[in-house]
Image (cartoon, helix red, strand yellow):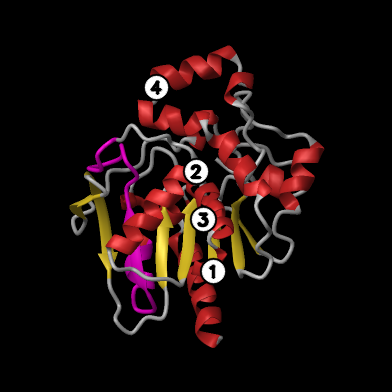
Amino acid sequence: MTFASILIPARTLLHVSLLCLLCASPAQAAAERATVDTIDGRKLESLTIRNPAAKATVVFENGSRATLDGWDKVLDAVSPAATVFAYNRPGYGQSEATGAPRDGATIVDELRSTLRQKGLAPPYVLVGHSLGGLYMQLFARRYPGEVKGLVLVDALYPRVIKKPGDFPFYTRAGKWLFFSRTVGDEIDRIHETGELVAALPRIDDKPIIRLVNRPLGSTAIPVDFGAFNFDEGTRAFVRGLYPKAKTVVADASHQMQRTHPEIVVAAIREILALEHAE
């Protein structure tokens, strides 16, 4: 999915359905180096590449239905300049599902607790794809003192997704039929999470790079399953969220970290260079 139609005043619309917001099933790349540990009483699958000389830790957050495999082509390219951490949220991959709410505040606090228990201290460069980008925005706004910068990879932004009660019937039915309980619970809390982000203080002092997929090919099919707000008020709100951010527009794919990892790597390295330059 692309959110270029929200971020950029252009005619381009979504090129995939709601199912792609929730990231169509990712290719099965093997996370051979990942480990499963017990964190806060439950099994969590993660991968840490430690760089003792690094001055920052790059933390990756997956989109909905996606796993840490998606960052395979990015992790090693970044590790010479930073410690890197990628993981699977509860209910994904080998990470044990949880009965805890799947709102952004809970997910961010679970991630923050995991980082502490892994001995991964701030400052953090937060990298989030799609729904993971919304979670990373919340992390940065709740704990700005721990964050050096953000890379938002075709990210989701507050108010783009409607309240779940406002989804058309066929969208709600599709969510129930095709997605796991974990994914469905995350979807139902997207609007709430976005409002949490919007209510917190701005982070205009943080370096932020927004990577936006704007497909130009003839296969880009405009489809809207009734879950998105495309009104001009929402567009203006999203464009005004991070006025100092650098926006990179690419004809790539929603899964940019898989299909065009060099774009993601370049953005992370740019943030890291700013961090080292301080």
In which quadrant of the rendered view does residue 5 lie? Answer: top right
Quadrant in which the C terminus appears: bottom right
Judge by depth and name the residue closer to the eye, 192 or 66. 192
> In the rendered structure, which amino acid carries the disc numbered 2?
Gly
Quadrant in which the N terminus appears: top right
Query: Around disc 3, counting alpha carbons within 10 Å, would you say few (fewer than 14), some (14 to 19), or many (20 or more)?
Result: many
> In the rendered structure, which amino acid carries the disc numbered 4?
Phe
Residue 104 picture location, percent across and down = 49, 43
Residue 19 picture location, percent across and down = 48, 30
**Residue located beneath label 2 in the image:** 104
**Residue located beneath label 1 in the image:** 145
Q: Residue 139's mark?
A: 3
**Residue ID at (49%, 68%):** 146
In which quadrant of the rendered view does residue 60 lie? Answer: bottom left
Q: Which of marks 2 and 4 is in front?
A: 2
Q: Nearer the viewer, mark 4 or mark 1?
A: 1
Mark 3–mark 1 Cα distance, whole angstroms, equals 10 Å
Judge by depth and name the residue closer to the eye, 1 or 37. 37
Query: Around disc 2, counting alpha carbons within 10 Å, would you say few (fewer than 14), some (14 to 19), or many (20 or more)?
Result: many
User: Mark 3 or mark 4, which is nearer the start of the sequence?
Assistant: 3
